Amino acid sequence: MPDRRLAALTVAALLVTGGLMGSINLLVDGVLRDGAGRWAYGATMLTLLALGASIAARGRVSPRHTFTLVLLGDVVYLVVVLCIDDPLRYATPLMLLFPALVAAWFLELRQLCVHMVVTTAVCLAALWPSYDNPVGLGVQVGVSAGMLSAASLGVFLLRRRVERLLAATETLTRLDPLTGLFNRRYLVEQAPRIWRQARRDGTRVTAMVLDLDHFKRLNDEFGHAVGDRVLGAVARALQGTVRPADVLARTGGEELVVLGLVADAAEAGQLAERLRAAVSAGRTDDGYGVTASVGVAVTRPEDGEDAVASLWRLVDQADAAMYEAKRSGRDRVATAAVPRARAPRPEETTA
């Protein structure tokens, strides 16, 4: 998934960056403690580089592993402090900003709270040897941990805001602004799911095209404001009638499409009749209403076929049946026989 890959690459980049930057201290005299401290420090930096390379190669990291790596980053800082000769000068708590930012952008709130508690404990343990005065230690820990936690919380809240805006934007791109129904884009997005489910369950897919009768005359006679209210009333009536698993979409003007699964054409016809009756019974608050002509088509999906192309072939068949309902007097249901798709003959492609 793209989000997991982004998380993996971000964590990997921070690990490698931290390992490379930290490795510079191995080349500077007087920074690291001699003996075991230098070896422990070098092993820690090598571990960071290895972890970063491994995560980048896999290209994915789970939320649980991200949480573990964030806590590992806190522990690494503590190890660095123990290996540094002068921690206040060469290992300030600012180093914890790396895990803090990762935690803020990729963890959930409960995990972030755990990380902030761990950050405070790590700051206390790291700064303890450098202060004789408990008051000074408390102030420094409070300032360092408080700033890190505030930065984490701020980035976390910004992330949540961005996520909400993206979700709202994505929802709007799938909805018809006038009726609140789904639009053509959402219908296309749902086609592969419906075709897979039909093949798995051994059922058929039905498309029902509804076209409101004499809607242009209604607009011309009473105005577009009345027409818009009628469309809203129709949308509400249909939303209360379609089954929860059906997809109801406005595909343009006064035309609506319902896509769903049925056992056979008889069941599809019964559903279409319920939709027709719901439109006929629907009224605006001031009493305006319309009827609808409904065309029905049914198909049994086959393995390997393109769901989206099959969707539009099915909708075309239902659309043709809808026009037959119009010619037969309107406010009625007509069912089309849907032939299996075949490759065009050479003479048809050149006609």
Image (spheres, rainbow, N blue to C red):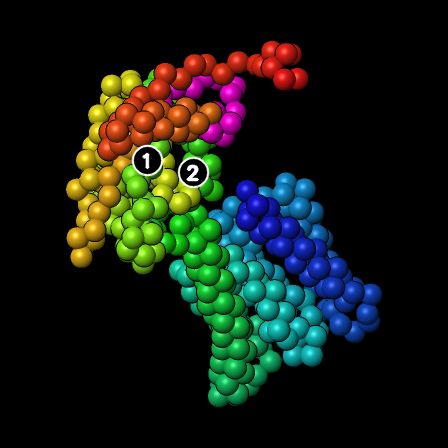
Figure check: 149 above or below 232: below
* Residue at (52% x, 19% y) in the render: 304
Quadrant containing the C terminus in the rendered view: top right
Q: What residue sits right under mark 2 in the picture?
A: 187
Q: In which quarter of the image is residue 43?
A: bottom right
Query: Disc 1 or 2, which lies upstream in sequence?
Result: 2
Q: Is residue 223 left or right of residue 150?
A: left
Q: Quadrant of residue 300?
A: top left
Q: What residue sits right under mark 1 in the picture?
A: 210
Mark 1 residue type = Leu
Mark 2 residue type = Leu
Furthest residue to the front? 221
Answer whether residue 297 is magenta in the image. Answer: yes
- Report the number of discs: 2
Q: Is residue 47 left or right of residue 256?
A: right
Figure check: 194 above or below 121: above
Q: Label 2 crowding class (10 Å Cα cut-off): few <14, some 14-19, many 20+? A: many
Taking depth in this image into account, of 19 and 209 the one nearest to the observer is 209
Answer whether residue 49 is magenta in the image. Answer: no
**For the residue labelled by badge 2, is the local secondary structure a helix, a strand or a loop?**
helix
Magenta-highlighted residues: 296-312
Q: Residue 119's spot in the image, x, y percent?
A: 51, 68
Quadrant containing the N terminus in the rendered view: top right
Figure check: 137 above or below 185: below
Q: Is residue 301 left or right of residue 278?
A: right
Marks 1,2: beta carbons within 8 A: no
* Residue at (71% x, 59% y) in the render: 17
Q: Residue 67's spot in the image, x, y percent?
A: 50, 54
Q: Residue 65's spot in the image, x, y percent?
A: 52, 48
